[in-house]
Structures are given as structure tokens and as C-alpha cells.
Amino acid sequence: MLAGLRGSNNEGVLALVLVVIVVAISILNPVFFSLTTMFSIMRGSIVPLIFALGVLIVIISGGIDVSFAAIAIFSAYTAVKIAQDGNFDPGLIVITLMAACFGALLGLVNGAVIANFRLPTLIVTLGTQGLFRGVLIAYVGSKYIANPPMSLDEVAKTNIISIVNEQERGAFLHVLVVPVIILTILVAWMLKRTMFGRAIFAIGGDDEAARRAGFPVVRIQMMVYILVGVLAAVAGVFHVTLGRNANPQDLVGNELDVIAAVVLGGASVFGGRGSVLGTVLGVLLIQVINNSLLLAGVPTAWQRAAVGVLLIVGVGIQALSAKRKTKRSFVTAQLGA
């Protein structure tokens, strides 16, 4: 039965774990199982899920990117500051497009260095994380923007579902959930149905084999990091919109939650495997755990510790699975000989 639940990336098992945790928390704290909490978790998942989609793509390709948060705040803050300094309000879509251009350029920097010099992705993106953040604060701006363009403020106050009961407890589903769902569907389609998606999986599985098969590995890797930069920029704008302010100190430092969600969702840290469905479930799992710990009054430091433990467990399970698979292949080869 468990084998039937697993799916190609253990999505079934993860979904079952998520349901069990929700039921257990709801029994201990009935307030948790409510539309208010569910909509709050969905709102809280908006930015992490967009980040996670980008991280998923990189991990499938065999890399790791820890600069996405720095790219996000650099792109969003710069776009908002340009609008503010120019005293114009182009609207959410135009600001997002402006930020996406900055995100693409910063992603290109990552991609060009990694693909052309074949350097370790973790080291490169750690370096560019500091570089992008330093350039932002030194040359773009370090001041907190308390009043972003009015169009962002209007979106921040817009909900597609608003329910207020007799006890004045409201349940509000934010409008930005809609574009995130669309983005999620597009990324899933890209990975499963396009040649670019197949190339990402091929490179993550074995880049030399992919090169021999005719895939333009350098170009694909550069496109991967450009795409991650664009997704990070979109997440940055949504973060600024939801928070109704632009702070250049935001986002950097929260990468652990996103990477943990993607790994728990079944993406292999060794590359070549991962799914959008698993990533969505991983993000929801992290949000549910953080939300439940918050309701229980657990300090933020312990919440971070819990996510760290989950990441170690997720990577450990993958390592054991890979070791078992290698051993099984060796035994099969010996028997065949």
C-alpha cells in the first residue's frame, strides 16, 4: 500500500504526512482547523512557493542556488525605488516586469560563471549573494521605503474570498494566490512537456551524457539561472506588495525554509529528480509546521531548528536511498555475471 502511495518522488507519502500533521494539530488545537488558518497558510506560501519553484529547477539541473533571496530583494527594491524616484506609478504588472529584467541579469551573472567556468554552484551563489546584497545597499539604496506605489498597496488589500463570521474572525484568501497557481502550472508544464524541461533533467542526471546526447549544456545552464532570477524577482515584488513596504534588509537569511521544502518534496540534491507537486506539498508542510509552532508559542529560533532537522532528515533519506539503489544494482550485476 505504501509503495502505491509513493509516486515517482514520494508525493503520496508526503501528502499523507501533511494530512496526519494537520489532523494531529487540529485535535490538540481546534482553532488551527479553520478557514482563517488555511487561508493564512496559503497567503504565507505565496512568496516561498515562487522561490521554491526556482530552487526546484536548479536542483533538478544538478546545482544549488542560495542567492535567490538576494536577487529577489535587489530586483524588487530597485524597481520600486525607480518608480518612487521618478514619481510615477506604473502598476503591479509593469513593476514586476521591471524587476524581472533585473532578476534575469543577476541570474545571467550566476549562470555565466557556473556554466562557463564549471565552478561549484554553492560557492558561486554564496559569493554572488554577498555581491548582489552589497551592491544593492552601497549603490542602489539602503533606506526603508514605507510607502511603495499606490497600485501595490491596492493589490495588498485585495482578496478574492472574504468571510467574516459573527465573532468578527475573518478568513481572507489573497488575490496573489491566483498568479502563483498559474506560475506553478506553467513550471510543471515546462518541466514535463518541453524539450527545455527534458534537458534540465538530463543535465542533472549526468551532464556529460547530456552533452554527448546533443544537449547544449552551457546554454541550458545559463537559461536555468536566468529563469531562477526571474522567478526570484517576481517573488520579491510579491513580498514587497504583501508587506506594503520595501526593505533592502528583507528576505536574505530565509533560504533554509525554501531549500528544505524542495528537498522534502522529493527533489534529489544529487540532481535529475524532482516534481512541482512534491515542491508544493513541501512548502505547505513547512508552512503548517511553522504556523503550528507559532500558535503553540514556540520561539522563532526553535522554529528554525525544526526546519533544519527536517532538511537533515530529508537529505539523509535521499542518501540512504541512493546507497541502497547502488548496492542493489551491484548485486544484480554480480548475479548477472
Image: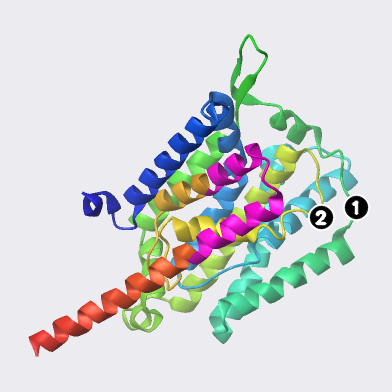
Of 204 and 171, which appears nearest the observer? 171
Per the rendering, the mark at residue 56 is none
Q: Residues within 10 Å of mark 2 (few under 14, many from 20)?
A: many
Estimate the spatial distance between the alpha carbons at disc 2 and disc 1, rounded to whole Å: 7 Å
Q: Which quadrant of the structure image shows residue 23?
A: top left
Residue 294 shows in the view: yes
Residue 91 part of the magenta segment: no
Residue 290 part of the magenta segment: yes
**Farthest-out residue, front:** 28
Contact, mark 2 vs mark 1 (Cβ under 8 Å): yes
Q: How is the image coloured?
A: rainbow
- Residue type, label 2: Pro
When the figure is inspected, residue 149 is found, relative to residue 107, above or below; the finding is above
Q: Which quadrant of the structure image shows residue 191?
A: bottom left
Of 21 and 166, which appears nearest the observer? 21
Q: Secondary structure at mark 1?
A: loop
- Residue type, label 1: Lys
The first of marks 2 and 1 along the sequence is: 1
Q: Position of residue 64 (x, y in %)?
A: 54, 70
The residue lying at 40 percent from left, 73 percent from top is 319
**Farthest-out residue, top:** 166
The residue lying at 75 percent from left, 67 percent from top is 132
Q: Which residues are magenta?
A: 286-312
| Residue at image mark 1 | 143
Q: Position of residue 35 (x, y in %)?
A: 54, 25
| Residue at image mark 2 | 248
Q: Position of residue 247 (x, y in %)?
A: 82, 50
When the figure is inspected, residue 33 is found, relative to residue 221, above or below; the finding is above
